[in-house]
Image (tube, rainbow, N blue to C red):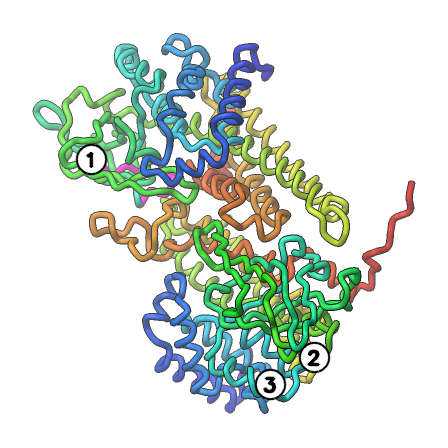
Amino acid sequence: MKINLTVEEKAFEANVKDFLASELPSNIKQKVLQGRALKKEDHVRWQKILYEQGWAAIDWPYEYGGCQWSAIQKHIWAAQCAISAAPEVIPFGLDMVAPVIYTYGNDAQKERFLPDILASNVWWCQGYSEPEAGSDLASLKTTAVIDGDYYIVTGVKTWITYAQHADWIFCLVRTGSPQTVNNDALSFLLIPMDSPGITVTPIISMDGAHEMNEVVFENVGVPIENRIGEEGKGWTYSKTLLNHERAKLAHVAVSKNRLQELKKAAHDTLTGHGSLMDDPRFSAKLARTEIELTALEFTEFRTLIAESNDTDPGPESSILKIVGTGVSQSIDELFVELAGLYVLPFIDPESAEKFAGTQIIPKQTINTARLYFNNRKASLFGGSSEIQKNIICKDVLGFDLNEKRGEK
Amino acid sequence: MNFTPSQMQLELKESITRFIDSEYDQVERRNMLASAEGFSNVHWQRMAELGCFKALFKATDGGNGGTALDTMMLMEEIGKGLVIEPILASQILSGRLIVETCSESAKAKLLPQIISGALTYASGLYEPLGRYDLSYVSTRAYPRRTGFSLTGRKNFVLNGGDADKILISARTGGAENSKGGISLFLLDSDLEGLSIHRYKNIDSHAAAEVILDGVFVERSANIGELGQVLPGIEAAVDAATLALCAEAIGAMGELNRKTLEHCKTRKQFGVSLSSFQSLQHRMADMLIEYEQAKSSMMYAVVMSDENHGIAPKEISAAKYRVGIAARKIAQEAIQLHGASGVTDELDISHYFKRLTTIEVQFGNNDFHLNRFIELSREEEDIN
């Protein structure tokens, strides 16, 4: 997608480029370029640089530290970050819990939590899913029972990304009586991870990484003042949050940049009949993906424009999530096809040059398998693609999902 | 057209199923993966005792089977059980290379130790710049007074780090990618000038990069006709490709079964996942993929057995169709299992990784589609 920029927008773009060129630490940039896992310190270091610049929370309202950027400016920012191989901001604090706090929290909570999120002083994680409540989030069983000035929280949360690094977790918990099984009994609680009674157990994913965890709460006391908004409104609050999360999960700018890298790599990959780019089968697949991605970019742009007119991202964010994950997973698959047999060796990227001083896998494909494996979760997390389609069916198309077919 | 298994084939299938069920569970498999060897010699010997290896060779070669149907029956079970032992690299690919290229006397010398499981083999046929092209051989074998000196590099050598013997394709004539001038050499793994760098693949099978730096071998190390072994290499790789297709079918059948079971038992929104029509249709699609892939594979098996083991076009068709189904079924199995599908703990991800590997090995989908088109054209030109 090419946009004709105004003089001001061009100046903004130049400013963004300068900033990224001078401020993005080169070791972090290298890690992103090579698809290597970043450490917590890397993320925090970069997010603090963004904070110093005043660009840590571009989507927040201005009064809390946001940027007041136009849709075009946000687009420029995302594109330049991807091109410069800047890490994506870890969303749990800045993009996920903060909007709930500044929208539904009281003044004391805003003052207490927002500045530390903005400055990346604290690390957050999200406690929604449970072993028996995955796609069906509303059936979650973790309870919070009032005892004096505290809620006593008991239950199991799972698939918690980066819980091992987190200082705080925001949770959906069941308040009301245990008999209430509808969404009206859920509340939104902020819980310090060092509270007595919390146990974190790693879950290793198929690429060998430790990102996910199970978090067990055993009679954990949480001050009532840590509840956001009203008791029983947690589901409503989190739905707004999920809409924000989904819109972000399209990863358009990152996919665009990866597609460019894929093209370059296809030119460099020899097949015996010229380069892989000369193979009509491969280049057609590349072209199809590019067309889909360009359309997605414009869909996202339309959403950004609507948002800048103060409309909350609604069900259209589900379309962004479904198509965005589809495109990014197609790019993963094309990298696998491009790598050919080089996708097979499962070599630690830190020691890729150990074989007699020569590279066993070309640099461009060293992380191909890991990324392909790791990104399978994209269509599951943040509401699976199936759940996104249910949202579209219910909220856009107006279907009654509980309607029963006539018995035969 | 006959694809009804014999009594003996059915009995072997039953005993390997029993072996996998009783002695090869996922806990045992995980322990092996974590061990230094990466697979178990005990299992290897058990498979030899059960007659798995014998079934892969003709009676005239010391076996009791040797048809594509024999291989298929075995490899489907290997796929179901996610068996990690190097049966494909050693008994099938290397064994078949010897069968295809060697004299009767050489076969009589080499095959018994393969069939008994006493030795394992590896075959280095691919090179860094050749992609899937078996005729791309830049490794050179220079004639010396009493033998040859080998220099070059072979990669993606399955079982290369663990094998007792390694077969290497090397050029004794012709340009880098010409079809003539390719010869086959049998190497001990401890020769001077030979460096073997072992690593694990994404599916936990071990492989190696083999670097030859002036490795001297006696004249007798050259097996097969000097400069003329490419057709034999292609036939052996085709046989291994078909075996891999059968393994994939076994793995896919198991993934479909596990996914169906999960959807019937996992409850969300107060009902089982399998009560949602959209998910029912997804599982119906997975079954259709499986059956179509299985038919492509079986047709290639039948054609191969009716044409003395030669069915390149049908084998490419099968590899392509199986590759399409493998990707679809592996991805859908994860998606329908939800987040637990991407964990290391559940074996769904292990099947996913094995199927991803199979899709790439011996040529990916595009490679075999292109090969199918070329072979079809050649056929039309002849007719």
Q: Depth check: B33 or B312 in front?
A: B33
Q: Is residue B79 left or right of residue B36?
A: right
Q: In this view, does A400 lie above or below B305?
A: below
- Which of the 4 image quarters holds residue B49? top left
Residue at the location (52% across, 85% down)? A115
Give the labeled residue for mark 1: B140
Distance, label 2 to label 3, CA atoms, is: 12 Å
Residue type indicated by callout 1: Arg
Residue at the location (68% across, 63% down)? A143
Does residue A250 show up? yes
| Screen quadrant of the N terminus of chain B | top right
The reply to whether callout 2 and callout 3 are in contact (CB within 8 Å) is no
Distance, label 1 to label 3, CA atoms, is: 72 Å
Task: Identify the chain of the residue marked 1, using the numbered disc in the image.
Answer: B
Residue type indicated by callout 2: Gly
Q: What element carries label 3?
A: helix
Q: Is residue A70 left or right of residue A234?
A: left
Task: Identify the chain of the residue marked 2, using the numbered disc in the image.
Answer: A
Does residue B313 show up? no
